[in-house]
Amino acid sequence: MKMSLGVVVLCVLTLVELSDEAVYKKLSSVDDLKSVYSEKYLPMHNLILLHWFANTVNINNNNVVHLTYDPSRDFGSHYYGNCDEMLAPVPQGYQYYTVGNLNPPNGNFPPYVLYPQVIEYAWMGRNRDRIIVQAQTGGSHRVSQMYLTKHFTKPSQCSRYDPNYTFELSTDLLQQLRLFSFTNNSQTLQQLRDHFEENIDDTQLNDLINIWGSAQARLGLLFLIVTPQRANMIGLCKQKSFLVTDSAVDITDDWQNCELQQMQLDVKTGDNGKAKIVWRNVPQNQINDGAAMVLFNNQIDQKNNITYKVIQSSEGSLTP
């Protein structure tokens, strides 16, 4: 009896010791990403950040990841001290680094990361998603661990990242994300869709090309696969486009209605006689993601906006 009691006590102590080190869900495939997005409301820009990261690092024939940038400075990457012990202690010769801050002077990200084609994911959003890597401090920058995480809404001095939204990344996931590279022409959009056995018809693929452009349609397909409920709203929530003149805003074209969100966007005459853009019924989740009212010279030139206003309430107005 005494021996049995001793074994029970030993097992309990072992379980307590293991629980002290956090273990995060490991994302090993696009299907795993899809599962996470169905469970949690993640910042959608992190798909763009993941896409960039997967197609920026080097993965050798042994499936080992090496950073191709200086993690102490490039792309705003910097040392992460893990002061809240959210992650395991680093072995000798390694350090944690974090990357993903889009605020200046981190402007050496490619334009599709800083200024996504789709307004919903524009850079003026919350800017909370990050990737943390455990990398060698030597010249090779070999990576041993990778994590997707996000900042708390109001980070404390030490606890900067939310463990409830932290996931371990695998090299296998990065390899799958590399299939969506802008320069990977080994598979057509149809073949890439079929590769992931997705029930997406050719009409939807054509819509992706119209919304994202032919150069970035693969990224649009990634959104459609991972988060179909939200991706269906991408680019379709511009009920009307506007041409800004010196004294008015003219309706130039009709777009599809946002039936799923029931958002409304109208042009009215303001008190000063000029046009006033009014919005209503903007969902709170869109506001949390960093929704904004953006005005362009025309529908084609969507890189040089005239003005924008971050939407902080479900209804409001903007007078250009």
Image: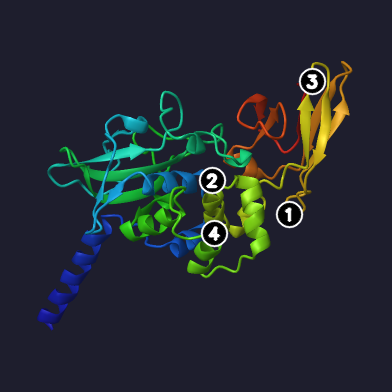
Distance from disc 3 to disc 1, alpha carbons, whole Å, reads 31 Å
Name the residue tied to disc 4.
189
Rendering coords of residue 27 (x, y %): 38, 59
Eyeballing the image, is 310 above or below 119?
above
Residue 241 placement, left or right of 122 = right
Looking at the image, is mark 3 or mark 2 nearer the viewer? 2
Task: Look at the numbered disc 2 and give the secondary structure of its residue.
Answer: loop
Location of mark 3 (residue): 245
What amino acid is found at the position of numbered circle 2 in the picture?
Ala
Q: Nearer the viewer, residue 117 or 126?
A: 117
Q: CA distance from mark 2 to mark 4?
A: 11 Å
* Residue 8 image point, x, y percent: 19, 75
- Height in image: 286 above or below 299? below
Which amino acid type is marked by label 1?
Leu
Mark 3 against mark 4, which lies toward the viewer? 4
Q: Report the residue at 28% width, 40% height from top.
A: 68
Local crowd size for mark 3, using a 10 Å CA cut-off: few (<14), some (14–19), many (≥20)? few
User: Badge 1 is on which residue?
Assistant: 260
| Mark 1 to mark 4 CA distance (whole Å) | 26 Å
Q: Is residue 210 above or below residue 151?
A: below
Q: Which residue is mark 2?
A: 215
Could you tell whether 115 is left or right of 64 in the image?
right
Q: Say what amino acid the circle numbered 3 marks.
A: Thr
Identify the residue shown where x is 37% and y is 32%.
Answer: 75
Mark 1 or mark 4: which is in front?
A: 4
